[in-house]
Image (tube, rainbow, N blue to C red):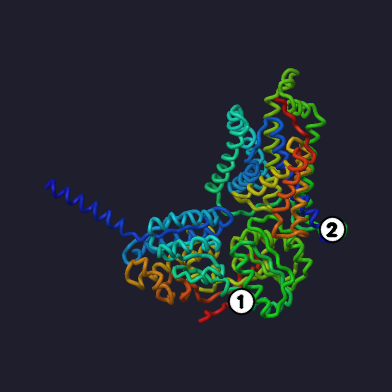
Amino acid sequence: MSNLFDLLVAGLATGAIYALVAVGFTLLWQTSQTINFAQGEFVMLPAFLMLAAMHAGAPFWLAIILGILLSMLLLGLAFKMLLVDPMLRHGVLPLAIATMALAIGIKEAVKQFFSAEASPFPSIVPTGDISILGHAVSLQSIGVLVLAILAVFGLTSLLNRTSLGHQMQAAAQNPTVARIIGVPVERMILLTFLINAFLVALASLLITPIYLAKFSSGEVLGQAAFIAAIVGGFNQVRGAIAGGLLIGVLDNLAAAYVSTQYRAAVPMIFLIAVILFRPQGLLGRAEERTV
Amino acid sequence: MKSTLVAGALLAFATATSVHAQAIKLADVAELSGGGATVGTNWKNGIDLAIEEINAKGGVLGRKLEVTHADSQSNPGVARAQVQKALDAEPYVLLGPGYSGSVKVTAPLAAEAGIAQIMGGEAAELTQAGNKFLFRTSFGQQSSMPKVAKYIHDDMKAKTVAVVWVNNDFGRGGRDVVVKELDRLGSKVVADLSTEAGQADFAADVGKIKAANPDAVFVYLNEEESARILKELKRQGVTAPLMGETTLIGQKVIELAGDAANGARGHVGLTTDAPVDLIKAFRDKFAKKYNYVPDHNGLKGYLAVYMVKATTEKMGKVDSKAFADTLHGLTIKAADEPGILMDVTFSETGDIDRQSFLVEVVEGKQVVKQVLPKVK
């Protein structure tokens, strides 16, 4: 049982990353009905932008800033203007397919212009352990967990406690009415894309020291975050957070107490159970459509 | 005068075409992307370096070597399709793949075409199926794992061992042989853990190892996962000595794992840190050309091409049908063919016999602790 505490902390740290990425799914869905199947690649790319900056001679702190800014430019602004806006008028399905193509394009571009091999990536959290309740807990796990919680807390505070956040929610819930009452809906939607780009850049910064920088690393992450978003509730930010943490912990506990061989199957079984018995997700709200 | 010029031009064209046609065509299918990208990239670069060297010295029997590279995407299904495509072009010899799973599904195709396949896979079963066209560039697990088990039992004095392996053909093959050998020698396997290729989080696996409290841990994963588990083993404070094979202590693993790789030991059939002058020279040439130090897969790719050269020169002709027959039972001496790097003998099953090494990672570098002689 002493192992349980370590497994919980490690699972929560991984789950917090899934939550960051899953929040992006729900944000984009709420504001622009976009399911971004390149979300995993969006997490992979910022690490390579930062590595490229470091290879060009920038110190790590500057590379982080450049990486985040470039991510917001490419994965937020350019993604919206060049792909989502032109494709959305054709419907959700063509847009979803376009994001799949984008995922392949990003992966191949990184492979071609950087490397097919994994690269080490520095950690912003120092290595080593601290003692909590007699357990040696990795500083990296704690750091990842704390930073991810801070980011999510900042986001929910922005959404729920500021005028800007209220405008964003209004734009998401009913753009027509929001426009009538003077909310700059287009600007709010753009802001959502920029926030998603910031979150994936942060996730990239936190997780790449553990996952290693590799062109294919977004595949696993995107899939886990997608499951997390569905499990928690695709239309609720808090659902995505809960789903992310749950999948992270479940994965580790399944590996330890069920079977390492079938660990990948456990979240999938959980996903199927949720879809069967609560299709709107654990914390999501049911959406009805009148025809 | 005009007709003479035309005739001359035609002759020059025909000569050029003829020279081009005389190139010896090799086909390579490797893991250039996906989970085995490190393996495939090193393998490919080793091949290209060898071909460049050989062609610069006039080629093989006066003919240049040419190679086409295809990407298996580290996927056996894709590898099979790529090998079929490569064989349709009727190459002299097929090179690759590096992953045992991919070799397993492609070897029957090459055998059916009667083309020799020189590959990097290490799974024991590959050369035990009676395929007369399959050749290794390094030891199979049936040769390396008994040495590993013996070292764990005799030198590490481990009475209890945790075995952690990757759940694919490569990992399962190694696990099966090492567990059998440990059992035979009297070391008890107290944890037997399978992991997934591409797995990122090893907290639970290492937790199980820690709970089993073994005298030694045998780690048999692919390179990137090896680096991740080394980090986690260090983080969770596992102090039992770590033993592996080539994939645990390769250059890429050391680069990715950093300090966590220190102290890990492994048996390697090939290492660029071997105390062999020809290997040192190879390492320098490779690093100069590609700006990094290769792992064992770079050596494997390089050797594969020199196996082609030595065998062809032994035959004195370019004959893909006779190639496999000639390579079986052949001993190539480094004194005669420096590109082969160490004296090597190929058995009737396509297995390899030569010196091997026991290495330890010390301060981020492989240090050879023992040189193990050829078996025969």
Near-viewer residue (B84 or B191): B84
Quarter assignment of residue B264: bottom right
Residue drawn 74% across and 62% down? B206
Specify the label residue B146 is tagged with.
Answer: 1
- The quadrant in which the N terminus of chain A is found is bottom right
Please say if B290 is above or below A18: below
Residue drawn 87% across and 60% down? A134
Near-viewer residue (A272 or A173): A272
Near-viewer residue (B232 or B101): B101
Which amino acid, by three-letter code, is at mark 1?
Pro
CB under 8 Å between discs 1 and 2: no
Answer left or right for B39 relative to A178: left
Q: How crowded is mark 2: few (under 14 residues within 10 Å), some or many (20 or more)?
A: few
How much space separates mark 1 and mark 2, taking CA atoms?
41 Å
Q: Where is residue B105 in the image (x, y as percent from the top left)?
A: 51, 61
Q: What element carries label 2?
A: strand
Residue farthest toward the left in the current orientation of the protein: B1
Q: Position of residue A74 (x, y in %)?
A: 61, 36
Answer left or right for B18 relative to A72: left
Which amino acid, by three-letter code, is at mark 2?
Ser
Q: Where is residue A162 in the image (x, y as percent from the top left)?
A: 80, 29
Please say if B155 is above or below A178: below
Q: Can residue B216 be seen in this view?
A: yes
- The quadrant in which the C terminus of chain A is found is top right
Residue drawn 34% across and 66% down? B318
Residue carrying label 2: A131
Please say if B347 is above or below B51: below
Judge if badges 1 and 2 mark residues of a common chain.
Answer: no
Q: Can residue B259 be seen in this view?
A: no
Q: What element carries label 1?
A: helix
